[in-house]
């Protein structure tokens, strides 16, 4: 975990940044001076899309990180289960990121996401997936077998939201295209949103297409682009031909994600980790 003041895009702008690193890659970034947790762009879009659900919806978060989703979903009065494989990540989230009172309202499970979903006895209205091993998504969470289990654990009007780094284009988008193809093959209805500024995409899946036009304007008005229709990528325009289907017995997602992983690690090593050494910024946990 590292704290430092970072210059913003505008002259004279800076924010009080706290970052959780796993395997030397940033997993959570918050502005400690801001009212709402989370500085990464996709967090705000995730929160807006979940606002389609009513209070007391049951949410499952796969991959805790610093716990930004926990704070956002708690504000929406969701009932929250967390599945995180690493106990030290949970300890960091509790100590450095999320207010103490929230933890009394959530259930934390130290488990592998696939194992937890298989043994879960209840249906969820929301399954939020933001899982990475450093810069690479874990293969077993994104296979057709995994999405079939999610279908079984999803309520009739429930939604699955997935954060994927980079648009599904070119060599750098190979992993994203395979994830999209696998979700469609699993029989889920899918919407793909390309986010401005960050380059991330959000995948929104369910038994039927969710009507994001029902999202209250109070949530959309805070977004860089509040018209979600402008961000929508029709799945028929995504070149899925030749993209491998992700299955349990052929763990290839890390290979497909190689170009994106190399880009991400190189960028962060150049722009962040090297700067920490140059300016003697301490990293603590």
Image: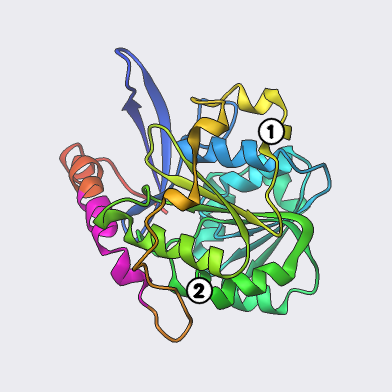
Q: Report the magenta residues as a range.
A: 252-266
Q: Quadrant of the C terminus?
A: bottom left
Indicate the secondary structure of the residue bearing disc 2: loop
| Residue 158 - label | none
**Closer to the camera, 230 or 110?**
230
Q: Residues within 10 Å of mark 1 (few under 14, many from 20)?
A: few
Q: Position of residue 112 (x, y in %)?
A: 56, 74
User: Residue at label 1?
Assistant: 213
**Closer to the camera, 73 or 140?**
140
- Identify the residue at image location x=22%, y=58%: 262
| Residue 143 - label | 2
- Identify the residue at image location x=25%, y=57%: 171
Q: Residues within 10 Å of mark 2 (few under 14, many from 20)?
A: many
Q: Position of residue 254 (x, y in %)?
A: 33, 70
Whole-Å distance between the Cαs marked 1 and 2? 30 Å
Q: Is residue 60 left or right of residue 141?
A: right
Q: Is residue 228 left or right of residue 124?
A: left
**Closer to the camera, 135 or 224?**
224
Q: Quadrant of residue 125?
A: bottom right
Are discs 1 and 2 less than 8 Å apart at CB?
A: no
Residue sitting farthest toward the top = 12
Asked if residue 274 is among those painted magenta in the image, a careful observer would answer no
Indicate the secondary structure of the residue bearing disc 1: helix
Q: Position of residue 63 (x, y in %)?
A: 54, 60
Asked if residue 256 is among those painted magenta in the image, a careful observer would answer yes
């Amino acid at each position: 975990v590292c704290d430092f003041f970072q210059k913003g895009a505008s002259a004279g702008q800076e924010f009080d940044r706290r970052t959780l690193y796993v395997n030397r890659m940033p997993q959570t970034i918050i502005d400690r001076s801001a009212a709402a947790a989370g500085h990464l762009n996709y967090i705000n879009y995730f929160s807006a899309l979940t606002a389609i659900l009513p209070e007391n919806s049951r949410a499952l978060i796969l991959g805790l990180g610093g716990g930004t989703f926990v704070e956002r979903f708690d504000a929406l009065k969701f009932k929250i289960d967390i599945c995180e494989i690493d106990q030290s990540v949970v300890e960091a989230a509790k100590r450095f990121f999320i207010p103490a009172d929230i933890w009394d309202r959530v259930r934390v499970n130290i488990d592998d996401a696939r194992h937890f979903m298989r043994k879960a006895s209840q249906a969820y209205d929301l399954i939020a997936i933001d899982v990475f091993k450093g810069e690479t998504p874990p293969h077993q969470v994104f296979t057709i077998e995994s999405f079939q289990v999610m279908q079984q654990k999803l309520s009739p009007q429930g939604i699955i939201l997935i954060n994927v780094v980079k648009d599904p284009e070119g060599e750098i988008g190979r992993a994203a295209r395979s994830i999209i193809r696998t979700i469609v093959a699993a029989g889920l209805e899918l919407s793909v949103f390309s986010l401005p500024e960050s380059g991330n995409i959000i995948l929104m899946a369910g038994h039927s297409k969710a009507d994001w036009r029902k999202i209250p304007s109070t949530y959309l008005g805070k977004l860089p682009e509040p018209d979600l229709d402008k961000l929508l990528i029709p799945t028929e325009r995504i070149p899925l031909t030749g993209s491998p289907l992700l299955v349990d017995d052929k763990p290839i997602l890390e290979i497909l994600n190689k170009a994106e992983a190399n880009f991400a690690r190189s960028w962060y090593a150049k722009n962040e980790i090297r700067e920490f050494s140059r300016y003697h910024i301490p990293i603590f946990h």
